[in-house]
Every structure is written in C-alpha cells, then in structure tokens.
Amino acid sequence: MSHSPEAKYRLNYSAPNFKIHTTELNFHLDDHHTEVLNRMDIECLTEGASLELDGENLQLVALAINGRVLSEDEYSQTDKQLIIPNVPERFELVVETLIDPAGNTSLEGLYKSAGTFCTQCEAEGFRKITYYLDRPDVLSVFTTTVNATKAEHPYLLANGNPTAEHQSGERHAVTWHDPHPKPAYLFALVAGDFDLLEDSFTTQENREVLLQVFVDKGNLPRAKHAMASLINAMKWDETRFNLTYDLDIYMIVAVDFFNMGAMENKGLNIFNSKYVLADSSTATDQDFLNVESVIGHEYFHNWTGNRITCRDWFQLSLKEGLTVFRDQEFSADLGMRAVNRIQDARIIRTHQFEEDAGPMAHPIRPDRVVEMNNFYTVTVYNKGAEVIRMLHTLLGESKFQQGMALYVQRHDGEAVTCEDFVKAMEDASGLDLVQFRNWYSQAGTPRVTVTETYNAENQTYLLTLTQSTPATPGQQVKHPFHIPLRVEFVSNSGEPMALHLLGADKPTTILELREQQQVFEFHNVNEKPVTGLLADFSAPIRLEFTRPETEYLAIIAGGNDPFLRWDAVQQLYFGALHTAVADNSAVALTPALIAVLQKALADENSDPAMNALLLQVPSEEALSQEYDIIPVEAICRAVSELRLALAKSLQSELMQAWQQVDLGSNALNSSTIAKRMLGNTALSFLALLPEDASIQRALKAQFKAANNMTLQFGALQAAVHANHPIASELLTDFAGQWQGETLVMDKWLAAQATAPISGTVSKIQKLTEHSAFNWGNPNRIYSLLASFTHNLGQLHHSSGAGYEFMIAAIKRLNASNPQVASRLLSPLLKWRRLPENQQAMLKSQLVSLSKLPNLAPDLYEKVNQTLTDN
Ligand code: B3K
Ligand code: ZN
C-alpha cells in the first residue's frame, strides 16, 4: 500500500443519493476476458449529487447515459470509483466492463473454481464485477443473462427464476429474473457442469418449490444429506418461525474453491463443497451435523438477511447473529440440544473471549472498519447469536416470536439496523430494553463476581453480584450490561430447591443483573443453597465464583441443567490445572472428581454424548483465556498431565465405554452419534497408554474395521495426537486409502497440524509440499495452517519457528488471497499476552509483516491495530 487504507465509521452513515430501480446484467463468460454489460435504471434522489460508482480491478469498455456514449471528460476514474458528476433525474446507465475470472485468486467477485464460473459478492465483491452502488441499502430488481460455451457449461444459473433460453453455435445463454429487490451482495451466477440432485417442497402457502443441489460429477450420493437438511430447514422455519419460502426454485451449488462456508445469495446459494458433500465413509458425524447447520443457516437467511437486509455493514450482526441463533435452534430442535449448547458455550469461551481480550475487540455492531471482510467474526456471529438468545431468555419464546413477527411486518423489503430489530422486540413485548442495547455498543467480556451470605436465623440468603467489563481499544469506560442469569438451586445433599426472591410468588429462575452491583434477597430459605448460576450459559460473560469442591459435586449430583453440570466438572479441571500452573507442580485429581466420572460412565441411563463432554478436559487454548500473560509451556504441560492422569485413573471404564461402540454400524441418529462421540473420546485417552497391547489392538480394530469416517478418523486422530507408536503406520494407510479425496485428506492434514507434539512446525512445513496440499485452495490452507494456529504449544514454541513459518505463509498469501491470509493472522495478534521471549520474537515478525510492500487492507488493519494498541 502506498497510502494507508482508510477507516469507515458507523456514525458517518448517510443514505444513498441514488436509487437503482432495475439492473440488467449480461455476462459473456470467458476465462480471462469476460464481458459484463450492466444496464441500470437509476433515479437521482438528491438534486445535484454526482454519481459515484464503486469498482475495482475493472477494465472500462464503454459508458452511456440514455443511449449516448459519454466522452472521457464527462466522467473520472480512480482505482476504486467511477464518478459521473452531471446526471439527469432519471436515466438509463449502461456500463460495459471486462474482467478476468480465471486470474482472480482472491475468490471474491467472479472467479473460476476448478472449471466452474462462480461468484462471491458479500461483502464488497460485486464491485469487482461491474461499476455499481455496492452498498447493502441500494436494492434493485435484477435480471441476469449468462452466456457461455455449452460443452463446458451446460448449466447456467443466476438468482430468481429462469425466463429465457437461447442457443447460438457453440454457446448458449439463459436469462434469470429475480422479482425480489436485493442489494448487490446477494447477486450470484454459476456456470459449469454438474450432477444434479432434485426434489421438491410444498410450502404452507401451497407453493411448489423445485429444490436443486448441484455437485461435481460423481458426487450425487454425497448430496442426499444436504437435500434432506434443506427440506428439514424449510419445514422447521414454517413451524417455529412461521416463515415461508418465496420463489419457485431453490438452488445450492457446491464448489471446491471457496473462502468461507457458504453464501446465501437469493435463490442460488453457493457452498463450499465441505458443507454439502457427506456420506458415512468419507464424512464424520460432525461433518453431517455441520452440513445440516450450514444448509439451515443459509436457508434461514432468506428472511433474516435477504428479505430484510442490513442498512450498512456495521449492522452485519442484524442478519448474522440472528441467523446463527436460528440455525442453533434448528439443530437443537432436531438433535442434541444440551450437547450443542455446551459446544456453543465452548466456542464463546475459547474464541470469542480471546477476540474480546485482544487488539481487534469490537462490539457485535462495530463502530469502525477498514476492511469489512475482517468483521465476519466470532463476535459478530456467535456473540451476536448469544445476544439474540438473551433477548429470547428475557422475552420467552412466545413474546420473542411476536417480536419477530412485528420485525418482519415492519421491515419486509427494507435495509434496516440492529436498532430496528431491538425496537420491534421492545414494542412487541413491552419490555424496557434501553440498557440491553449496551450489548450492541460495547465490546469486551463482562466479569460477574459473586458473594453470598446465608443467615440461618432469619432464613435469608443474599446473593451479591458485581459486574465490570475491562476496557477495550477505543472504549475505556464501560456501562453496566443488562444480564439475564438463569439460576437453579440445590441443597448440599444434591436435592433441587425452589427459592423465592423477596416479594415474588413464583420460584426464581432468572436473575436480571442491571446495576454495577446488585443484591438479590431470598426469603424462607431453610438451608444454605448451592447456587447454580448461568444455567444454559444464559449470557456471554465470565463468572467468577470461587467455591469449594463439595458445591460443584452437589450441582453435579442434583442439578437439572446440563450446562451447569458439565461446567461444574470443567471448573474442577480448571482448579486442578491452575494449581499445577501456579505452583509448578504435578496435576492432582481429587478422588471425588474421579468418582464423579466413574459414576457417570457406569450409569446406564446417562447420555454417552454428555459423558464424552464431561471427559473432555479444557483445551490449552481454553485454559489460556484464564491468564493475562499466557504461561504457554506450563499450560501445555498441565493439560497433557491432566489427560494422562485421567487415562490412568479411568482406564477400565474408558475401555468399557469404547466397547459400547458398534464398529459395524453407520446409522446416523442422536443415539449412535452419541456412542461414537464417547467411544472416540475414550480412545483418545486410552491412546496415551502406549504400552498396553489391548489399546493398540483397539486403535487398529477401529481404524480398520470401520467403513465409517467418524470411527476411522477417530482412531487416526487419537493415535496421532498421543504420538502413539502406530501413528505413522495409520497415517500412511489413511493417505494410501484416501489419496485424491481432498476433503478426506484435509482431515489427515488437520490431525497432524493440531498434534501437541514437538517438531510439528517442521512436519507442517514438509506437508506444504505434499500433493494433498494446495496454496490456492482455502480448505487446504484452513486444514493445515489455520488448524496449526490453534495448536498453542507448537505455534508459540520457544524456538519461534511457529511464528516464522506462519508469517512467511501470510506474506505469501497477501497477494493471492488476502481474506484467507487475514484469517490466519488473528491468533497471532495476542503477542502482548505472551511470555517475554515469545513476545519479542512474534513482535518482530509482525513488524516485518507490517512493512511488506502492497500489504492488503485486510492485513494492514489487523497488524496495525495490534502494533499500535496498548
Ligand atoms: N454471509 C456469508 C458470509 C460472507 C463472508 C464475506 N467475507 C455466509 C453466512 O454467514 O451465511
Ligand atoms: Zn450467515
């Protein structure tokens, strides 16, 4: 960058000066010379305003207003804009540009993915296709004609319904019309050759919808689960949200080169093939669940995102937080609610808390953005979903749905703000959400500390909650949040207790913390209760509540809430880990904790999936969130000792749990998934005991017997992560079996990248030369390199080799795919939280990155933020 990219601010929003009533696009597709003809019916809304169209990497061929070609002195061009100063009140503008899809390695705009032309426009990719008002509050009715050679591109797709077909020599063309006005970021086109899976869905309004899933040739059987998930999603959205599909056709196209998971383009979703293709021999249970969730997510955007879209990109969480909440509820209603909830909480605690504590901390509705693509974050998405969930908790399902209905009724067809959403919830429920809005404006993770007083004589119990939120860059002062804390109480002997707040006639289930400090007073309490706070992880906060082991044991024994029971065990793990780290001592597990786990594993009525989660000790990354300065080596030592201690103390129970798995079954339902989850977790511990021959046999048996990827990969990963003597044999066998199956080989790469074993950096370095790896494909990069960035001990190895390797990779990707490069950089921004040695090495790597010529805005924003922030 010769000049620094500029920041945009939320408060500088101003409404567009022009309306684009219709947009007619004509694509003459060609690898390096695609012609784009763009005919717009434009109305000027602000007299005298000059028309400033966005455009990047475009070659302008012709420009005409109302049929008259403009001469060069009638407009001006920069590398980002085309400016026409004098335009009529209403006019037709025709822009003709040339673009180079095959040379587009950024995978944004129009590009080629292994022979398929496809697009990715969100957030600001449409401007790489043609000159346009590329902002989400400019909504237009699109008609798109795609023209390409017929032999290579028998399928020509765009948004809406097909209206015309045309054939001429070797080429053909199809025209599509989308009747729903939409912003340019939802535009899509695809041209290629596919296998096609079709089905149909009749909506509650009796509209017959044609459903199509397009996949690479030969992959048809792997598309079935995606289709079933789509049908489930359509049904679920009608039943739970009363939202119905609105076109006659819904298409999903799977492509191999894609920067993220999928994209909700109107009527034409484009998916990373990773989230479409699944069969039991090549996909794990988690892959199946991910397909269901992403298919659901993109479908749910049809209302929350497409019909009602964002006014500006600062409002991204309006559609993303809400849609993640919806997809979480979809998965929970269809499958394992408690398991999902715990996994979601784990993501927040491990990854969102880290973002909130780092230089890029931002509210779910950011105020300042340099590169929009940097804000598709765990904060905007997952914390955004938690904020919606808190509204749901405060309002209850019925009022929440009334709020949704009001939101849709008010804003269908509009581009709106987070404020509009909260207002609809407020108006529908009658609740005061003034303070609740702080969740939208303030970054940072609130800490809530707890003290309690029980008075046996008066039978009163006082719970004092104090909240504070650390400063984040640009936000020194924080106001108190409105925090819903779900509670449950148990007696010391582990019996449920009903407690009443002073003056309340119903037992208390939710405490609303609004003040900086607030005392909750309960009456007629006949013994000191054990208070389970933050049931169902009801708020994205850190709870600081120091209590004796006996109280955790009471919650485990008598608590109702699965999250609280799981969390009680986690807190006991955390306690043991903290002590080991602080005292530089060996990890000590108490007999009581071992007994809890033994009991859970022995209980025939317990859910194997919950048992798997109970056994999974905090990851090194999760533990690191507990420290201002991360004692990397001590954390890694403690976590690995804890794993080994559990393996030793529970060996026979783990072996029994493992034996419950039916190695011959591929059935995919909650009960078989749960058993495999527990089996794999058990095996991952057992693999830590290499001298035991029966364990070696178990690993091999599971690896070989199964025609099931959950089991095969479970065995591989267990062996690799434990550095078991048979690991390299299994790695070789796996690669031999799956060579050429790129999505399967991604797992092979990831298992090695995440192994907590010294020497991982040089292993990964070598793997970048393996035929399974490809610097041009985001999935390969995420599997090998992004996975590695979550390998705490190896990334931050005291040699500095991890930093050197990663920064070199990021520099390499800067020019070809800055979005992907930027994702790799995030885990390296926390250099200030590292021990001195690592801090110095990482800082100097970051400084050298900041000096890279032509640094992309994506990287510029992050690297500058981390180097300048204090
Ligand atoms: N809306 C897209 C994400 C676009 C990311 C652009 N860098 C997928 C989704 O959230 O559904
Ligand atoms: Zn989304």
Image (cartoon, rainbow, N blue to C red):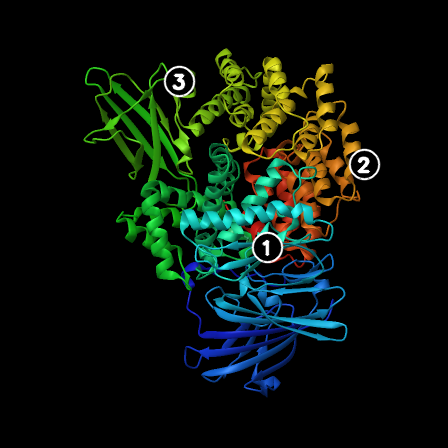
Identify the mark at residue 858; answer none if there is no mark: 1
Seen in the image, is 801 located left or right of residue 263? right
Numbered disc in front, either 2 or 3: 2
Q: Is residue 473 visible?
A: no
CA distance for labels 3 and 1: 49 Å
Judged from the image, the secondary structure of the residue bearing numbered disc 3 is: helix
Residue at the image position 57 percent from the left and 19 percent from the top: 584
Numbered disc in front, either 2 or 1: 2
Q: Quadrant of residue 665?
A: top right
Identify the mark at residue 385; answer none if there is no mark: none
- Mark closer to the chain start, 3 or 1: 3
- Name the residue type under label 3: Ala
- Name the residue type under label 2: Gly
**423 or 709: nearer the viewer:** 709
Read off the residue under disc 2. 736
Label 3 beta carbon within 8 A of ligand 2: no
- Mark closer to the chain start, 2 or 3: 3
Label 3 Cα neighbours within 10 Å, binned few <14 / some 14-19 / many ≥20: many
Q: Is residue 671 visible?
A: yes
**194 or 577: nearer the viewer:** 194
Label 1 Cα neighbours within 10 Å, binned few <14 / some 14-19 / many ≥20: many
- Mark closer to the chain start, 2 or 1: 2
Q: Is residue 840 above or below residue 671?
A: below
CA distance for labels 2 and 3: 50 Å
Read off the residue under disc 3. 554
- Name the residue type under label 1: Asp
Quadrant (top left/top right/bottom left/bottom right) for the N terminus:
bottom right
Q: Quadrant of residue 686?
A: top right
CA distance for labels 2 and 1: 38 Å
Judged from the image, the secondary structure of the residue bearing numbered disc 2 is: helix
